[in-house]
Image: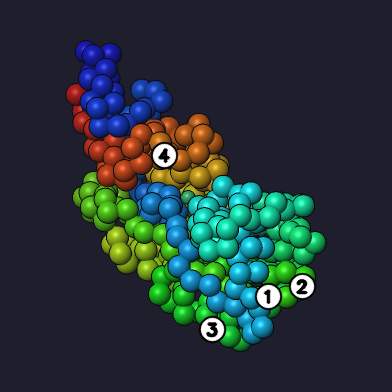
Amino acid sequence: ATPTALMVGTGRGAQLGILIKGPEVLETTREVDTIVLDKTGTVTTGRMTLLAVHTAESVDEAEALRLAGALEHASEHPIARAVAAGAEAKVGTLPVPEDFANLAGLGVQGIVEGHAVLVGREKLLREWEIHLPADLARAREEAEAAGRTAIAVAWDGEARAVLEVADAVKDTSREAVERLRALGLTPILLTGDNKAVAQAVAAEVGIDQVIAEVMPEDKVDVVKRLQAEGRRVAMVGDGVNDAAALAQADLGLAMGTGTDAAIEAGDLTLVRGDLRAAADAIRLSRRTLATIK
Ligand code: ADP
Ligand code: MG
């Protein structure tokens, strides 16, 4: 009866948009008690938009958008896409950077029209000992208090603008969290983004535990720490920065709408990128197991 039950289980899984790597995955679904959810692209759509531009005194908004947009045009990060698209819409064709580097979890840096430009978290600027002037720091705080992500722009050694971007929560995420809880799992939101934004998103979907401001390479350590506490951990993610954590988790669930690295690292793929499928996958796998035994 075993092979048939498995086939039924995975056949129904395919209908629900769930791909399971192998039968050994089913067993783990029974044991998991904690589910770590990546924020951007997993709980939220990951499609951000540029909402506002704040410039320091005597800085031209179009100049800030041209320099920031040019660098972000070379990155595939959801924030970068929002900045590049927003900049292009406002100032037209963007220059091509003379030099570009992507700094995972921090932002981008490069040379645009002879200027050394940084775009990203305040932490990235601090690494260069660049600090936000008071008016930009205030703009940043207000944006974050409103649940938006504030991106700093600096060039030639000075912080000159703050960009506000926001990303909508998927309309299925709240229900997904409810269903995961009903299966006995404790949800935890994990993100590289700042605490204020993370808490705003968590509140919107009904999660009360948040681990924010985690560097991409440290996400795996968060999973290890939870495991060391004796928890059995499922992790849902979509990004390159989630791959190690997905592999480390007792059960890794990758968003099918995410990166290949995440899909390769996961045990299960949620083809449609709908978080509710995480609950379906766990429920279905547990039921399939019950049929086999
Ligand atoms: P998440 O864990 O939510 O998927 P990341 O680890 O990719 O987020 O990024 C963490 C933070 O670093 C972002 O919230 C943003 O502040 C900053 N960041 C990363 N990449 C970029 C970029 N290309 N442009 C601007 N900011 C960036
Ligand atoms: Mg992500």
Query: Does label 2 or label 4 sit earlier along the sequence?
Result: 2
Q: Do the residues labelled 3 and 2 touch (CB within 8 Å)?
A: no
Circle 3: residue type: Arg
Circle 2: residue type: Gly
Label 3 lies in ligand 1 vicinity (Cβ under 8 Å): no
Q: Mark 2 points at which residue?
A: 157
In the image, is residue 222 above or below residue 121? above
Work out how far the residue at label 3 is from the one at label 4, CA to CA, in angstroms.
36 Å
Q: Mark 3 points at which residue?
A: 138
Circle 4: residue type: Thr
Q: Mark 1 points at which residue?
A: 159
Q: Are marks 2 and 1 in contact (CB under 8 Å)?
A: no
Report the mark closest to the observer, 1 or 4.
1
Q: Quadrant of residue 286?
A: top left
Query: 35 or 129: nearer the eye?
Result: 129
Q: Name the residue under label 4.
A: 257
Could you say where residue 264 lies in the image, as x and y percent from the top left?
50, 31
